[in-house]
Amino acid sequence: MTYRVRNIGIAVALAVIAALLTSFYVTNYKRHVQRGEDHVTVLVAKHDIPVGTAGSDAVGMMSTTEVPRRSVVPGSISSPDEIKSLVASQETFAGEQITTQRFSSVAQTGVEGQLRGNLRAFQVAGDQNQLLAGTLKDNDHVDLVAAITVGTSGTDYVFSRVVLRDLKVLQAPSTPAPGAKITGGAGQTTYALIAMTDSQAQKFQWVLTNADSSTSPGWHLELRPITHATDSPDHLDSVKTVLRDGLSRKALRALGR
């Protein structure tokens, strides 16, 4: 085989390879274009979804539609389950595709992400004993127990009761410094952030205004069990019930009541 024939053979082989590669590229490109023209199902907002909307509540604000694959927005979802445990951290406008990038976990959205409907965040100031500082933790549940003085015709009567039940602690009070005396909690102001309805907040504010005393705080939080918590029947306690409850008949006669 001469030198010239060999070069021609190599040139022909290279040309064939180039033609094959070109054909392969064109075929793949056509497939890519055709795939981009395929329609896929996505979820879009029927109307504006504001910040703070729970993913489970946003289900009724969505509708399905089909768009070309090339028009799918990154993070776009096709099922409400993908965001049902999340909260809207950015507003989604009507007609826009629903994306996971506009939603975050409750922990990422902070306190606001834990409030829905008529729930409010209510910050309470009290001493370490009233707010169970060092014991109370975020997400614990508490009751509010208070003693209220009622005056009638110049005579004061004191009644106590559990005013509110099963309130969620959003932010627990700070833990006392190591080595601090337990008795030193009285009078040392600390703070707790508690979730309650707007109506419950009114009652709590009334208690704070009328049951608090600089010498003997008239209210305290009490920690509820983590599981299987039950409530005793609601009732009022007074000096009469405190002295009488649990006494025998003989003791009651001796009491003269």
Image (tube, grey):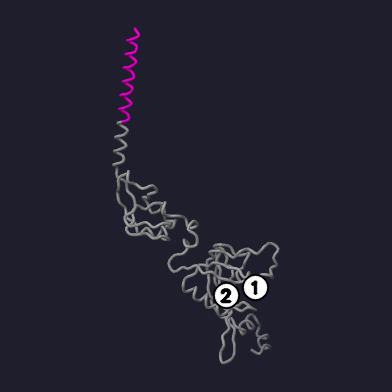
The residue mark sitting in front, 1 or 2, is 1
Relative to 65, 219 lies left or right = right
Which x, y percent locates residue 80? 38, 54
Kind of residue indicated by mark 2: Val
Q: Which residues are magenta?
A: 1-25
Of residues 122 and 225, the one drawn nearer to the viewer in this rendering = 122
Which x, y percent locates residue 49? 37, 59
Residue 145: give its label: 2
Kind of residue indicated by mark 1: Gly
Of residues 120 and 15, the one drawn nearer to the viewer in this rendering = 15
Which x, y percent locates residue 199? 47, 74
Residue 187: give its label: 1
Residue 228: give its label: none
Of residues 246 and 150, the one drawn nearer to the viewer in this rendering = 150
Q: Considering only vertical position in the picture, is 2 above or below 58?
A: above
Relative to 84, 206 lies left or right = right
Q: Considering only vertical position in the picture, is 17 above or below 231?
A: above
Where, quadrant-wise, is the N terminus in this rendering?
top left
